Image (cartoon, rainbow, N blue to C red):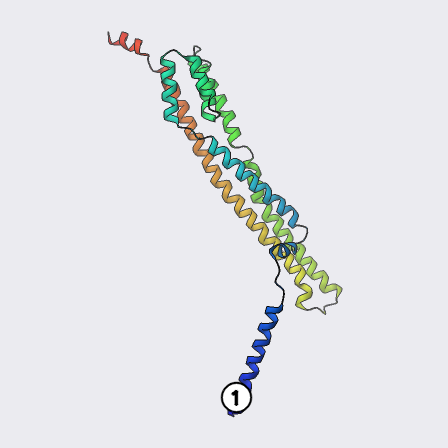
Amino acid sequence: MKIIYLLLIQAETAEEDTLLQMLQDEPSMSFLEVLSQGGLLMIPLFVLSVLAIYVIAERWRTFENSKMDITHTLNNIETLLKSGSQQRAIQYCEEFNKPLARILKSGIRRLGRPLRDIEEAIKNAGKKEIFQLEKRMNWLATIAGVAPLIGFTGTVTGMIRAFMDIQSLQGNVNPSVLAGGIWEALITTATGLIVGIIAYGFYNYLQGKINRMIFELENASADFMDLLQAPSPKKRQQQEV
């Protein structure tokens, strides 16, 4: 019995060694080779992923370049206006190619007109800046919705391909025959979900930055209007007398 037991152990060990050797000898697929198994639908998914990266990078750079010290800017403009240097205040705004500076410049140019006209000019300039901030964000939202749908389409086409293989071989198939369709189904689905999740996550993140920036611009515009309505030092002295 001991001899039989030892023989069985040796046989099992030999089988394990053989299987391990087969796995080691089998060539591994590269990342690009795996993606290529997804079929033609990987092309639009690749295009969407590149487009998403472009929009994310471009919007991120735009938001970073739009930052401005609101308090410092308003204080400088207030100082220039109180000194009677309207043209210098406009030139100061033109030094900064940023949304806040462009909004304030549109209001400063209309100084001397009724406050309603100045406020209307600031609102119109604000609408233009908000449009520029939200530019191409609809692309990112579309990618977030379309990419998973393309991936699910790949699932359907992969299953169709697998069943067509079964029909062509009249049911005499093995798992290796179905591997092509299953590869296509799984890879396109996974790729579409990954692209969609990343696009959706960055869309919400960037939209949050846009909302915060709009809030800051609205507050800065309101502070600027309060600054214009504040009495000048001469008027204060006359009121005190």
Question: How many numbered marks appear?
Answer: 1
* Residue 120 is at least partly visible in this image: no
- Nearer to me, 140 or 159: 140
Measured from the top left, where is residue 150 in percent x and y?
62, 48
**Residue 229, can we see it?**
yes
Q: Residue furthest left?
A: 241
| Whole-percent x, y for residue 203 in the image | 51, 40
62 or 115, nearer to the observer: 62
Residue wearing tag 1: 5
Residue 230 position by quadrant = top left
Residue 209 in the figure: left or right of residue 142: left
The quarter of the displayed image where residue 211 is located: top left
Image x and y of residue 90, in percent: 45, 16
Instruction: Name which residue lies at 52% across and 88% down.
Output: 5
Residue drawn at point x = 47 percent, y = 26 percent: 99
Spot occupied by residue 182 in the image (x, y as percentages of width and height): 64, 60
SS state under label 1: helix
Left or right? Give the position of 99 relative to 142: left
Looking at the image, is 126 positioned above or below residue 82? below
Instruction: Judge by depth and name the residue closer to the eye, 199 or 25.
Output: 25
Label 1: few (<14), some or many (≥20) within 10 Å? few
Vertical position of residue 38 compared to residue 106: above or below: below
In the displayed structure, does residue 129 sit left or right of residue 23? left
Please state which amino acid type lies under the numbered disc 1.
Tyr
The residue positioned 59% from the left and 72% from the top of the image is 21
Asked where in the image residue 178 lies, by quadrant, the reply is bottom right
Relative to 192, is 13 above or below? below
Q: Quadrant of the C terminus?
A: top left
